Amino acid sequence: MHKKRAQVTIYIILGIITLLGVIFLFYLRDTTEKDMSIQEIVTSQKIPKDIRPITNYVTTNLDDATKKGLLLIGMQGGYIYEYQGGPVPDCNCSQSKKAIYYNGYWVYYDIHKDERDYYNYWFYETKNYPWIIYPYYSFEEMSKDQDFNGIGGHFGINELPPLDGSSPVSIESQLTLYITNYLKDNIDLTIFDEQGFKIEDGEVDVSVIIGENDVTAFLEYPLIINKTITNKITKVSYFYTNPQIRLKKIYEFTDDIINKDTTDILFDTGSPNNNKDDINIEKVEDAYENDDIIIARDDKSMLYAEPYTFQFARENRPPALRYIPITKLTFFGNQAIMNAKITEDRISLRADDPDEDEDQIVFTYEPSLPYHITQADFDRGYVILTVYAKENGYQDWQELRIDIIGES
């Protein structure tokens, strides 16, 4: 009986695998047919030899527009501004923390500080940031010898735009608008008047397709070309270009980096361990004040003889002081009580920083240490000590009530 059930299970698994394989083959065939249809539409147009300088001129402008749009998308964190022909509003970017001016481009902040509290558990404001007993989730965990894996909390907001879709700020939509505006501004068919052509043109209609390993820009642009000497009329409507830029892969790589950086405080964004599939990452620290630039380069995608680059800005965020569970200090003997003091070695300190700036964290105390305990402190039975973790203008802190016990 068990043997029959095992056989049935195997058949079911094989059936599922076969079905998935068929679906995958249909998907590949469908994708290939779509790609081929664009080429076939364009190449099926019968273009006389003497007309080709005109169609080459339009195709060259389309290729220029697509490549320049891809360059802006990559150098500016996935955004093209209005003054460049895109949809993103212009701004006083540095002061408004929208973008950093870096190497000639306004690099958008794709990581901002998170300024939202979540159900009274996670807090963005110090001193409770990121949660009250960070990195522990319960007081019981404090007594256990467990390594903190860094995952948990909200250490930033992912501002990377969607890759495709109908959103006006999706990368697909931005490229479409940019290419359209570029063509309208740069195509001038009157330059062919002196060559004996009279050209009537229609509306520019651009479509952008972001594939697995390339980007295709398809242009529908009806032209009625009249060669005035012979009065021969040629109609041309379709053009395309196909830069071999792995935009989708570098986008997904960047999105993964941002998601890890905003959820895992121990994640090292600039680590070479993050490199994969010939995409390498680099961190430029303090590109503007204390904010960083994160750069991803794809060695398998060349644009203007350089690896394709996708970079974004990251806003500096506060350090997180690890919860200090100290509650009581006991001093023995009259001499010990007379010289009783709280020193740094009596307190276990550690803080984490989401921007990998742990080496810049400075710990301070109020009152300063070493603190000599007074008779009034013994009479009261406790001392209030505030511990601060400070980094680049931010600070997280904890107020400690330390019970003081003196025993002769």
Image (cartoon, helix red, strand yellow):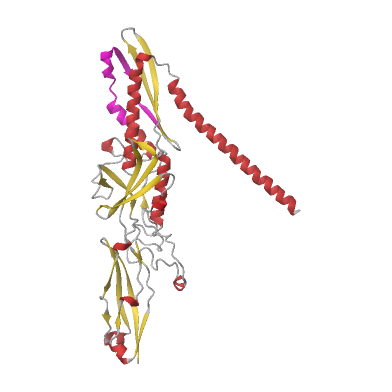
In the image: residue 34, left or right of residue 262: right
Position of residue 354 measured from the top left corner of the image (x, y, whole percent)? 35, 58
| Magenta extent | 179-208
Residue 310 position (above or below residue 384): above
| Residue name at image x 30 percent, y 14 percent | 198
Q: Quadrant of residue 62?
A: top left
Position of residue 269 measured from the top left corner of the image (x, y, whole percent)? 37, 53
Residue 104 position (above or below residue 112): above
| Residue name at image x 40 percent, y 45 percent | 279
Does residue 203 show up? no
In the image: residue 72, left or right of residue 42: left
In the image: residue 49, left or right of residue 83: right
Q: Quadrant of residue 60?
A: top left
Does residue 317 show up? yes
| Residue name at image x 28 percent, y 83 percent | 373
Position of residue 309 measured from the top left corner of the image (x, y, whole percent)? 34, 42
Position of residue 212 measured from the top left corner of the image (x, y, whole percent)? 45, 38
